[in-house]
Structures are given as C-alpha cells and as structure tokens.
Image (tube, rainbow, N blue to C red):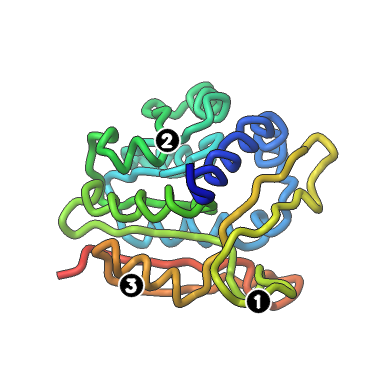
Amino acid sequence: MNRDIRTDTEVLASWQRNATPWIAAVRGGEIASRRLATDAAVLDAVLACSPRSVVDLGCGEGWLALALARRRIAVTGVDAVPELVEAAREAGLADCRLLTYEQIAQGALDCRADAVVCNFSLIGSTCVDDLLRAVPTLLEPQGTLIVQTLHPLMACGDEPYVDGWRAGSWAGFSSAFRDAPPWYFRTLESWIALLDASGLALRALREPLDPRSGKPASVLFVAQLRG
C-alpha cells in the first residue's frame, strides 16, 4: 500500500473516532469560522445555482443537506462514516448513503444532480483526485461543482508552499476530540489544475472573509463541465 492510500485510510479512521464530538460541535455552533463566514458562503453558492437536485459529498451530520432540503431541493447526502450518516438520517435527511470516495470513484453512486458540493470534505490525496475525476458522471449537463476548503495561503503556516501531507490538529476544539487526522495540503495552482484534469472549468473563485481578522476564512471554487 503506497503512502497516499495508507494516509487516506488514516484520515477516515480518525473521522470515525471523532464522529460523536464532531456532531456536537457542529450542532452546538462551536466552530466560530463556520458561524461567521463559511456556512453562509457555501449555502449561498449552492443556492445561486438554483439547483433542483444536489449531491452533498462528505455530508457529515447533514447540516448543509438539510438546509437545502428545507428549501425544497432534492438532496442526496453521502458520507463514509456510519455514525455521521445515521445522524443525518435521524435529523431528517431522507436520502443519505454510506459510501467511501473510492466506491464513488468506481461508480457506486448511481445518480446525477444539478449541483455537487464538497464542503470542507476534500482532505485526502489519491482518493480526492479519483473522486473529482468522477464528478462529471454525477453532474447533469449544465451542472455545477462547488468546493469549499481551507485557503492555501492561510493554511500553509510556516511550512513550504508545496503540495504534501500535513499533521492535523484539533486546536480550538473541545477535549473530546483526539487523534487529529492528517490532511493533504494543495496550493491554489494545484487545486485549479486538479479541477481542469477532472474535465471541469473554473467559473468562479471566492474568498469568504472572517470578519474578526479581515482575512480569508476559506476558498470556494465553482466549476462546470468543460465544453
């Protein structure tokens, strides 16, 4: 097993261990950047597409999928962590499926939607590459992919600005969290190149600002099928 696949597996294992405190943190509004900037940014980006149907990849406990469903949008939530899928279903998400990114890349998700959204859910390396290359098979012809993730310039810290695995951290979270997952850092150039390699054309790049610092809280990519 190569390092990327092994480390992608470690990411999923960590999220499985931390599912319970994650649900509590999201539903308790404990993550300030989400309250102040990023939740509204991704919801507004999806709604701006006026979709009738959405696939939420890495839906977690389901907050975004449920927010869209309340607006009478048909939503399919997908996550690889059983506890998160169960939490989303219990909260009222009618269509929530337990699938890994590897399974989706191999064609296990049999549906198409007007929009596919990945909200802070693209943490790994090889599995993310393969997933994004499968996104065109999930989109209707005029469909849109929306990705919100850590802003590379803000997340780089003192490390070199090059792609690579980084150690994770639960700094700022409750003591209930443990064994933070590693995550794969990508430069802005690498993100755009990956979208292009996946048959997608970047239509917009947004940088939601954290009102406390005036600096980007995230970066948000909006892309559509090329051609």
Judged from the image, the secondary structure of the residue bearing numbered disc 3 is strand
Q: CA distance from mark 1 to mark 3?
A: 26 Å
Labels 1, 2: front one: 1
Judged from the image, the secondary structure of the residue bearing numbered disc 1 is loop
Q: Of marks 1 and 2, which one's residue comes earlier in the chain?
A: 2
Q: Position of residue 56 (x, y in %)?
A: 41, 44
Q: Of marks 1 and 3, which one's residue comes earlier in the chain?
A: 1
Instruction: Pick whichever, 188 or 58, lies toward us.
Output: 188
Residue assigned mark 3: 202
Question: Is any part of residue 121 visible from this angle?
Answer: no
Image disc number at residue 160: 1
Residue at x 52% of width, y 25% of height: 82
Judged from the image, the secondary structure of the residue bearing numbered disc 2 is loop
Amino acid type at circle 3 is Leu
Instruction: Pick whichever, 183 or 42, lies toward us.
Output: 183
Amino acid type at circle 1 is Pro
Residue assigned mark 2: 100
Using the image, determine if residue 93 lies above or below residue 57. Answer: above
For label 3, the crowd category at 10 Å Cα-Cα, with few meaning under 14, some 14 to 19 and many 20 or more, is some
Amino acid type at circle 2 is Thr
Residue at x 66% of width, y 73% of height: 154
